[in-house]
Image (tube, rainbow, N blue to C red):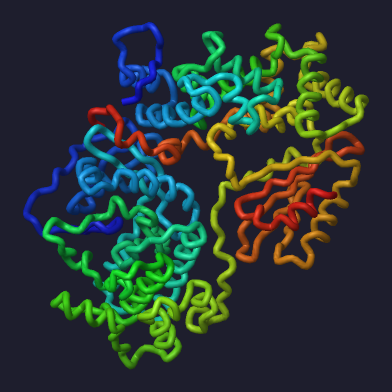
Amino acid sequence: MSCFCLRKGKPAKTNHDQFIMLASETSFTVNEVEALLDLYKKLSSAVIDDGLIHKEELQFALLRNSSKQNLFVDRVFDMFDIKRNGVIEFTEFVRSLSIFHPNASPEKKIEFAFRLFDIRQSGYIGHNELKEMVLATLTESDVTVPDDAVESIVEKTIREADSNGDGKIDGKEWKEYVGKNPSLLKMMTLPYLKDITLAFPSFVLRTQVEHC
Amino acid sequence: MSFSQNDVVVETEPTTPPTPNDTTVLLGKYELRELLGVGASAKVYHATRVTDGKSVAVKAVSKRNVLANGLAENLEREISVTRRLRHHPNIINLLEVLATKTKIYLIMEFAAGGELFQKVADGGRMTEDVARKYFRQLISAVKHCHSAGVYHRDLKLDNLLLDDDGDLQVSDFGLSAVKNQIRPDGLLHTVCGTPAYVAPEILAKKGYNGATVDVWSCGVVLFALTVGFLPFNDYNITVLYRKIYRGQFRCPKWISSELKKLLSRLLDVNPQTRITVDEIMQDPWFNAGGYRFNRVLVEQQEPEWEKSQIKTKMLNAFDLISFSSGLDMSGLFVNSGDPNKVERFVLRQKVERIIEKVEEVAKGTKIRVRRNEKCEGARLEGQDGNLIALVLVYRLTDELVVVEVKSIGKMNCNPNLMSCLMKF
């Protein structure tokens, strides 16, 4: 069995109990949780081999580079690090990924995306926040767009989404806006999660599932 | 008892198979229906997926058996390989793997049309036209797998199933670790287990090449379909081996001369001179009736054309943000050698001009450009008609556009074209 602890300091819970609990709380089966453990181990040993996902490791996985700062990786990391202790633990990893499951509810996806884009965690997405994200994306792809063009894109988007006219997008407006632009939720669904057992099949020999 | 869904050896033991009772549901996901077959180390069930009622075949393998045969590592590797093979219309897809402490369950697509073997057994030999249809589908599947570096090594009628529409479905590509193993007495058992499909170089224990071995087996299959019995057969296994080794077989006189020629090229005992898959596709019998092989389309997990909405719409700020790879969580699952790549550029250019440019670049290559009607972009297709790249053009402002080039799979093998596209 694997030697790493899922919950440091909390005694008497085996991995298997954890897996059953995670499966009951998420869209995954116990086998899928076991397969995700392999993915987790791979990611969490990429930079610092301590069985926990650090920000550098998320950066490495998403950007193939562990030192490049990226606004969105920072945001994703903060969202996954539910306990806010600077690492993504396995349970956090499974719970967060579960929102990306094709079968997860759209409400959860919408809510997750809103919090992700609410970079100052102010409860709304304002003009400056949106512009900061657009600029971050453009910089990341080494693309230069004249400032007035960026300004007009941001302004136009705010105008489209801001139905109560207060100059910023709140959660309700975001929900309506996504309803009109469903492609915005595409990044919230990972088809890979459907065949995770084929991608990481080594669980079949280690599984603790008693019977089907 | 019917024993469809792949190579399970049906034994005539009087044991009643442990029929699952009506309520057996595997890990809450698949409801077991009837038992389709029992083998030395596996049982195959028909089952339905609880969420949507889809029919699947469940192959239950005893873990002890896999471990005892030292096949654990193979199994893991083969499952990942099989995953890469999916999406060919003539290959049975592995959908999922489930496991308990004692058993491994491979969830596969269900071939509702049963076995091709049964068709020959019931109806006797087929006309050459009918056999040709199946043979083309078989070769298409074989080519697809071989180009991914996967060899079947155990092609035989029993592994060839039919779907609802009567199209061929090859099962067990890449899954030799869970095939029935040679039984403890060392002999291959029962009709399905005869070495009748085995190429001579395997018998010679010389070490062999998976590609040429599969071609030989395809030859045995084609012979069996059109003639109605196996080219090499004998009750005495030593005699059988000798026949295979010498390539002794006889074509009945009703076989057309074109087919005879093809069979002799397929069942050429010398793997060096044996016909190759590419040569088969040039063969006159294979191509009879003006058949063009190049349109066997593989269903790819291709990025959907972003539906109609993109057409005239300009990108909003969030569309733009979602281009960030920091938000593309699929990066967690994909290895660095990922064949699919996305590149984007912002250009001050007219949309129409960009597609024209793509067409200019592709001219003189073997790549075909298909403009997309619904939205602004083009598909780049290889010679076989399969998608190799998508070029999508989005409007950013009145003057600026974002060009997105998604290359799929082997597109990277064509760095020339890629770099031309990059240069815009």
* Residue drawn where x is 14% and y is 43% of the image: B18
Query: Residue at left 57%, top 80%?
Result: B290
Q: Is residue B145 above or below residue A122?
A: below
- Residue B314, compared with residue B290, is above or below; it is above
Which residue in the rendered view is the most extreme toward the bottom?
B253
Q: Is residue B299 visible?
A: yes
Residue B405 locus on image (x, y percent): 73, 46
Relative to B328, A166 lies left or right: right
Quadrant for residue B258, please give it: bottom left
In this view, the residue farthest toward the left is B14
Quadrant of the image containing the N terminus of chain B: bottom left
Residue at image position (87%, 41%) is: B347
Taking the image as drawn, is residue B127 in sight? no
Where is residue B48? Give x, y as percent. 33, 42
In this rendering, position of residue B374 left or right of residue B14: right
Percent across and percent down for residue A98 are 49, 24
Residue at 45% of width from left, 39% of height from top? A199
B371 or A38: nearer the viewer: A38
In-front residue for pair B258/B175: B175
The answer to whether residue A188 is left or right of residue A68 is left
Q: Measuring from the top left, give residue B362's x and y in whole percent.
A: 77, 61
Residue A36 position by quadrant: top left
Please determine whether, in this image, residue B337 is positioned above or below residue B1: above
Q: Nearer the viewer, residue B373 or A78?
A: A78
Task: From the viewer's side, name the closer residue of B45 and B41.
Answer: B41
Count of numbered marks: 0
